[in-house]
Amino acid sequence: MDFVHLRSISYKCIFKFIRSYIKDCTSRLEKTILDIIELIAEQGIMMYNPYIPPDPIFDNFESSGLMDTIANIIKDKAENNKEYSSETVQLIIIYIQINKGGPFECSIFEIFFTIFENIIDNISRNWEVVRNEAQFLKQAQLFRSCYLIRQNRILPNCILDLLKQKICPLIHINCINCTQCQKWAQTQEGPNFIELKYIVFDCLYECSQIVEPFRIMLQNNHNFVEHYISPLIQLARSYESKTQINHHLNLESLNCVDFLVTATSELIRHSNKFYDKFVILSTLDSLIKLSSYQQNIHLNPLYDNRTASIRRKCRERLREVQIYGNYLEQSFLVSLGYTKVQVTSFGIAGGVGEEDDRNVKLAVQQIIDLFETLRQGSIIYQAYQEIILQQLLCKVAFEEFEEEGGMEEIDSHIIISDDYKKYTSMTSILNYYCNYFINYNRQ
């Protein structure tokens, strides 16, 4: 008998005991059930997975009264404590797991948002007083309960309304983009404050991936998008104004930036329009600057892995704009120095910074795609509009590529290449690259 089968039997025994206890006992029932359920959650039994159907042992729980009991305990604890503890969050996770696929009780989340609203209103009125890391940590932990919204995989209208009214306004925290942000006094962004902002953006992004109307609302709200990319712009500007050695971020800030790079491109990619020119220019400029963020600075493995992830994702997002963008976006790429990013990525793939020679083939292929796209037009836009031949734009990019030492990088890889790179990158990719530009110069 394997371990998985033993665990399944133990789970069934535990919940059979709960069901029998509900039927047989009358005194201190709620406290006992709460203790058992918390023990289950602490042992990791109720790890939530939205893609796995509920276990058959949960079929009779609704009739046994366990669901109503858990819901009442959650409500009582919320009303008594006036805040959400980790204990309450565990209860909600168990409630969602057991009730997966069943009717959704909106009142549990309404309790959370009522408490949440009171806390946020108190912070906005007394922002100068609540300038300490302990308060920010408390709020960040509170926001983690927002993950429970997306775990249900179904967002009722009441939850969407609460998201719009209570979560969305928090994008103005510590921002100077518009007059709406003036009510939030400026404060120093410590690790817990960064985590708070990260969870706000993450909650909005994840919910937008579940509910199509909510995603469309966020995409069509230019004010929201500008606030969303604001941390990227601020980081890029501060990094540009300082030396690389003196510009270090804590891991919480790096996690926030790493997430925003991915989420920003997702929101923009699925939109029918790429917003106004300012948003395009600011976003692309920030991604280009951050694509070389701390590439030769090494502090510790965890920090290095996070900065490498930021650089890689920035280059991936730029490549998506390169392939799927229109003429305006491609023009911005060239004018902002995207060709330099390609040369840098090729050098990095060859052992500078990343120390990963296996990416040489992919890096050179991206360079080929760049000039093909610039000359022939976007792959996506070819299907919907007249193909724009951009020879002049391609010529400018190629000249910049030569000025940045792109050809020398290729020559150096040919000289120092080992057998793997010699017979893969050099023969299949570099030969194609050279032939492409021989044909290009003849035109």
Image: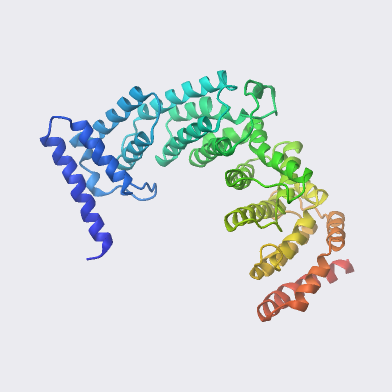
Residue 48: x and y in percent read: 37, 46
Q: Is residue 41 above or below residue 72?
A: below
Q: Is residue 235 above or below residue 162?
A: below
Quadrant holding the C terminus: bottom right
Residue 63: x and y in percent read: 19, 36
Residue at the image point whose x is 68% and y is 76% from the top: 421
Place residue 123 in its image quadrant.
top right
Judge by depth and name the residue closer to the eye, 395 or 310.
310
Quadrant holding the N terminus: bottom left
Give the side of residue 420 with respect to residue 193, left or right. Answer: right
Residue 191: x and y in percent read: 57, 39
Place residue 424 in its image quadrant.
bottom right
Q: How is the image coloured?
A: rainbow
Place residue 252 in its image quadrant.
top right
Residue at the image point whose x is 10% and y is 36% from the top: 24
- Total of numbered circles in the picture? 0
Give the side of residue 302 with respect to residue 178, left or right. Answer: left
Residue at the image point whose x is 69% and y is 79% from the top: 418
Q: Residue furthest left?
A: 24
Q: Residue furthest top?
A: 125
Residue 302: x and y in percent read: 57, 55
Judge by depth and name the residue closer to the eye, 61 or 340.
340
Give the side of residue 99 with respect to residue 332, left or right. Answer: left
Give the side of residue 402 with respect to residue 359, left or right. Answer: right
Q: Is residue 102 above or below residue 345?
A: above
